[in-house]
Image (cartoon, rainbow, N blue to C red):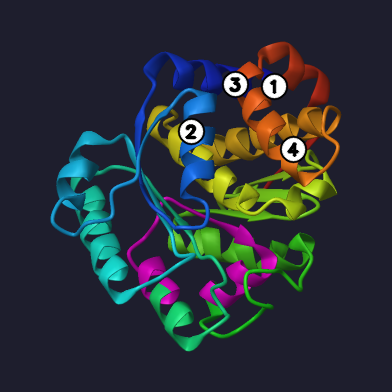
Amino acid sequence: MHKEISHCLQMLREQQPVVHNITNQVVMNNTANALLAIGASPIMAHAAEEVEEMVSLAGALVINTGTLTSYQVASMVLAIEKANELGKPWILDPVGAGATTFRLNVNHDLLRLKPTVVRGNASEILSVLAGEASGKGVDSIHDSSSTLGTIQHSASELGIVMAVTGAVDYVTDGKRLAAISNGHPMMAKVTGTGCTATAVTGAFLATCEDPWLAALSSLSCVGIAGEVAIEASKGPGSLQMHLLDQLFLLNENTIRNRLQLNLESY
């Protein structure tokens, strides 16, 4: 599988897709830099007056609900409807989905608009699927493996790809299940690493026709880059810098040597 992932990365870098992000204010700079480092071209446009035009220019749309406002939700819906109309892929990151009623309802409504991929931690995924609180703010109180039955069933029923991240990352389309064991616990000490994985998944979606492979490739690449970055980092501050470097430097040889992946089919 390392060859397929490397090929997807090569296609991303060759095509340099425009990725339109309606994302949260905490991570905007981080995710824009991560997209540039991996080889994509980020646009961070939130205004309702322009999001439809921006979606038309982009290869994929990233929706991140970390710092929601009613105005932003309206922009998200306009952008999603345009992406669906144009047949462009989009990814939903339901940040802290179960933390408040407003956040829960917004994420649940966005799920009904049929994202290509949903990526979140275990509690966020369980909340957005069930429509009820399950978590501690943006932090997960569940292990990613606890969602396996739910995400496989939901992926099959909704016709989407589900990606849940944690100590082990799982990606499924209901028929195929990937378990990715790359990454490092210190990555959880840097805000926005999950949001970075979501944004990078948007870049892969723009250039890979198989959404399951796109999500698998993204989480593998971010996890591997994080592992390598840790080796040069003294703590979370330097990890942010080295993670960007390793996303930029990532190559087939590193992917082949580092990839920790298990696959199952149903």
| Residue at mark 3 | 248
Choose top left, top right, bottom left or bottom right for residue 191.
Answer: bottom right
The amino acid type found where label 1 is placed reads His
| Residue at mark 2 | 35
| Residue at mark 1 | 2
Residue that appears at 56% across and 44% down: 196
Q: CA distance from mark 3 to mark 4?
A: 14 Å
| Residue at mark 4 | 239
Q: Position of residue 179 (x, y in %)?
A: 75, 45
The amino acid type found where label 2 is placed reads Leu
> What is the count of numbered marks?
4
Q: For the residues labelled 3 and 2, say whether their Cβ atoms are less than 8 Å apart.
A: no
Q: Within the magenta stretch, is there residue 9? A: no
Q: Which mark is residue 103?
A: none
Residue that appears at 45% across and 63% down: 158
Q: Secondary structure at mark 3?
A: helix
Q: Secondary structure at mark 4?
A: helix
In the rendered structure, the answer to whether residue 131 lies left or right of residue 140 reads: left
- Residue 117's place in the image compared with 94, above or below, is above
Residue that appears at 27% across and 36% down: 58
